[in-house]
Image (cartoon, helix red, strand yellow):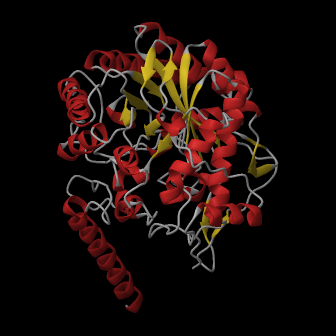
Amino acid sequence: MARFFKYKSVADLVAENERLGIDLRYAEDLSPLFQSLEIGTRTVGNRWCIHPMEGCDGNADGTPGELTFRRYGRFGGGGAKMIWGEACAVNDRCRANPRQIVLNEHTKPEFAKLVAECRRAHRESIGDDTDLLFGIQLTHSGRYSYPNAIIATHDPLLVGRYGVTADTPLISDDELRRLTDDYVAAAKLAVEVGFDFIDVKQCHRYLLNELLGARNRPGPYGGPFENRTRAARDILLAVKAILPKHVILATRMNGFDSIPFVKGANDDGVPVAWDSPLVNGWGMSDSDPFTPDMSEPIRWVQEMRTLGVELVNVALGNPYAQPHFGRPFEYPPPDGYESPEHPLIGVNRHFECAAAIQRANPGLAVVGTGYSYLQEFLPQTGAANIRDGRISLVGVGRASLSQPDWVKQLQAHGKLDRKRICRTFSYCTAIMRAKDHPLGQFPTGCPPFDKDVYGEIWKDVQNLEIRSLTAVSAKSAE
């Protein structure tokens, strides 16, 4: 059970860079992080972005819950000038869990309150909110839909996971065509409640991301690049057509998928058995699932710009199948595996993929990912990546849960509050995976550093695991 993060200074990390042969960069001058940026007709006041992170704390009817309001109030008051709202299902059938938020006519008033409360918190804490951009991520959960999986392609490497079998039917071409209407309806409501940008989600192996790599799907939505991007292209065009000029069209897109990993003999993550050529995958060749091939992601981003996309957030991997790609971690969740690589290699992969997209798209606002693992050195890497033109904005996910006011901390003290720095314990992921709750899903947050709310929730989840292990032991003894 190797532990990696023992660094006390930037010099320690620079030495580790050399040892690992990677290209993480650092800057003592943090001023690039506080520069404004023009995106379309809008201005964002600094280069900090809070990533879309589901709290799994909505109500059964899809409205934001009490903890949803609490999170976005904390985010609004924290100082970041871009808040990338979490995944919001475009219909009830494609929710990822029974507490995922859904934007429709019934839930619209509560979403309007959410936007207003977030902006009010920002004004009270920071002052001017005219340069705050608060967006929403529109999603179809695809094979991870609750309660029934909706798959776009048959992937032999994912059979047996999340209720998907070799006989699970594909979503039809007609259903894919009709989905455009759901995205447009949700986008119209998002504009009405006051969101500043609309993200059409294409990451983490949810439906539109799965279609991007659906090389073995027959018909107009699979096979060649033009077909695999067809559904997203139609949706982006239709959504752009209804957006007023002040609302930005955005997407969070995978730059690289890879293949599933499982827990090996020593608890290390090992890739599942695979054959070449691979029949599915985005951002990788059909003969190498471990090395990003950015040719198609770059091509698609360049095309999306012609469709009106002005903001791109680059993600990696599938959190259900190979979490170390998307979230380099020090401690795996209870149902996960030990990292099969040094986490800094994973961070570097994030930075290289985002930089490739940024270099190929000068002038595009690109948000990078993979920063939370760097802990107190997160600002120095973000500043260096912006300084060097590798990225436009720095996206922070898990570390926003433990310390939502990190931007204010930096401004006031020049460093983060060490007592609240995310140490990538993966408690937030562990809670998200727990389903034995009266509402079908535990709300998730940061138990170590937000104990008042999530400390008792974490105890409940731990008790569930103890009961589950006891039951298994008892059955084995029969």
The answer to whether residue 340 is above or below residue 142 is below
Q: Nearer the viewer, residue 159 or 314?
A: 314
Q: Tell which residue pokes out farthest to the bottom in this image.
A: 477
Q: Residue at horizontal 76%, vertical 41%?
A: 293
Which quadrant of the figure has residue 364? top right
Residue 203 lies, in percent from the top left, at 54, 38
Residue 170 lies, in percent from the top left, at 55, 36
Could you tell whether 79 is left or right of 13 in the image? Answer: left
Q: Nearer the viewer, residue 329 or 226?
A: 329
**Residue 236 in view in this figure:** yes
The answer to whether residue 250 is above or below residue 476 is above
Question: Image quadrant for the N terminus?
Answer: bottom right
Q: Residue at horizontal 74%, vertical 64%?
A: 20
Residue 391 lies, in percent from the top left, at 61, 35
Could you tell whether 337 is left or right of 111 in the image? Answer: right
**Residue 160 in view in this figure:** no
Q: Residue at horizontal 31%, vertical 62%?
A: 449
Question: Image quadrant for the C terminus?
Answer: bottom left
Residue 22 lies, in percent from the top left, at 74, 56
Q: Nearer the viewer, residue 176 or 48?
A: 48
Please count the marks in the image. 0
Q: Residue at horizontal 35%, vertical 65%?
A: 419
Which quadrant of the figure has residue 111? top left
Q: Nearer the viewer, residue 186 or 243?
A: 243
